[in-house]
Image: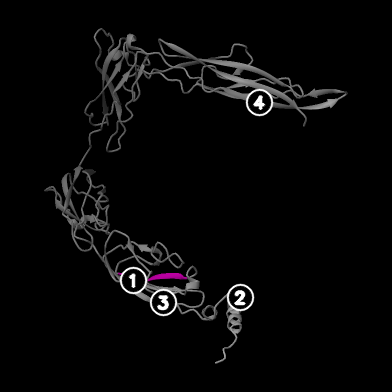
Amino acid sequence: MRLKPPFAIISLVGALACSGKSTSDSASADAACAAPVAGAGVDQTALLGGPVGLDASASTVCARYTDQATYTWAFVTVPPGSTVDDSAFSDNRSSTARTPTFSPDIPGDYVVSLVVADPEAESAPDFVVVNVVSGDQPPVASCGPEVAGRVGEAATLDGSASYDPEGAALEYSWALSEKPACSGLTSDGIFNGAGPSPTVVPDCDGVYLVSLVVSDGIQFSEPDLCALNVSAGNRLPEADAGETLELGSCAANPLPLNGYGSYDPDGDSVTYQWSLLSAPAGSAVDDASFDSTTSAEPRFAWDVSGTYVFQLQVYDGQVWSAPDLVSITIGDSGSNRPPTANAGTDITVEMEADCTYLSYTWDCLDCEATQVELDGSASEDPDGDPLTFSWVEPTGTLSIAVADSALTGALIPAQAAGQGTANTMTLTATLNVADCQGSDEDSVVINYSCTGVRP
């Protein structure tokens, strides 16, 4: 039998190899993409209060449109009373919205649809049902602290600290549990009783007990009780003599006191009465050492170290407050610790002035006067004593604006410039800080240069 020449077969294979693609590859490239298919995932049950995750990974999209497909989620139905809408999805209508989340606001069934689209086609919707339950923990009611009120005036209660462990929205129910024998008030007299901050207008003085129960839509809390303490007339003012202080031996003398924290719960204006309750051994001071015993902010001249105890009462025009006491301890001179001066970091100033070439010589303007800032505010006293400040620059070149201030400006006057040559100088400003007994010094160096340049 005669065989066909083998070179004919080799030529055909070579032709296919040189084409760069197989016949099957060419057919696949020309084939139309199948329409996308949405897969919204399996139905699920979720707890109220936490985010619910959705998953479109079961969807199918043509391979060449993988990065161009969009995923559109929508709520078909939500439980009655829910305010959740499509804006609740963490991601939507994009190529990255395969696994969005949302937070339900009440228990019930949330039916969600998913449509997947590519540049050529759009899928039919697929649906997933999310059954949201509230869990087994009841909500907790909190009707707030005791409230002071007056007869005939609205008093506001505060249940805003109530909560649901699963984060469910709450429904509020307020009721009047007990009332004074003189009162005809009922639970119907609680205004806005379905909200967290209702008001009550008591009709006589005494103590009213109000209860609050909250619901998450499924379970009810235990009731919480709060008291409304109502006065028919004037309430006692409150005195506040200020904070207890321990000062060093350099405490201000006279010593300032402050009773501005005092107040009247009825809003009445108050008058003040200060007195000295006790003084250290060896002291000769008494109430005459106040510059005023009836001022809100009097000053007291002390004479020896130790602890002074002051008493303040305030009067609202009808009754005096209970007394309030404040103690202030002044250290002895032997315990004083000196202050520490801090004149701040060194300063560098580089100035330039324009120069012109005339008649074979350079003529330069002066470098303008410039201001620097001296900052000694980081100086401190370990006893907290008040400090005095003093800045000095011994050459007199530096003009210090306020020499006795921790923070001040200082002026360097105009300086002559030479073309291409730096006119330099070093100035040292020294800061002295002192309390009533000790002092300390620190210096800041100002490195200055003035150079003439061609404009």
Measure the alpha-carbon separation of dots 1 and 4: 71 Å
Picture residue at 41% right of the left edge, 79% below the top: 124
**In front: mark 1 or mark 2?**
2
Identify the secondary structure beneath mark 3.
loop
What numbered label is drawn on residue 411?
A: none
Q: Amino acid at mark 1?
A: Gly
Start-end of magenta stretch: 69-78
Quadrant of the drawing holding the C terminus: top right
Give the mark nearest the N terminus, 1 or 4. Answer: 1
Measure the alpha-carbon separation of dots 3 and 2: 38 Å
Residue 256 image offset from top left, x and y in percent: 36, 20
Q: Indicate left or right for 430 with 171 as reference.
A: right
Q: Indicate left or right for 44 with 427 as reference.
A: left
Measure the alpha-carbon separation of dots 3 and 4: 73 Å
Identify the secondary structure beneath mark 1.
loop
Residue 31 image offset from top left, x and y in percent: 52, 81
Residue 77 sits inside the magenta stretch = yes
Give the camera-side residue of 233 and 7: 7
Q: Amino acid at mark 4?
A: Glu
Whether label 4 touches label 2, CB < 8 Å: no
Residue 443 image offset from top left, x and y in percent: 53, 16
Q: Amino acid at mark 3?
A: Val
Measure the alpha-carbon separation of dots 4 and 2: 74 Å
User: Label 3: few (<14), some or many (≥20) within 10 Å?
Assistant: many
Quadrant of the drawing holding the N terminus: bottom right
Measure the alpha-carbon separation of dots 1 and 3: 12 Å
Q: Which residue is mark 2?
A: 18
State whether residue 184 appears in this view.
no
Q: Amino acid at mark 2?
A: Cys
Q: Which residue is mark 3?
A: 37
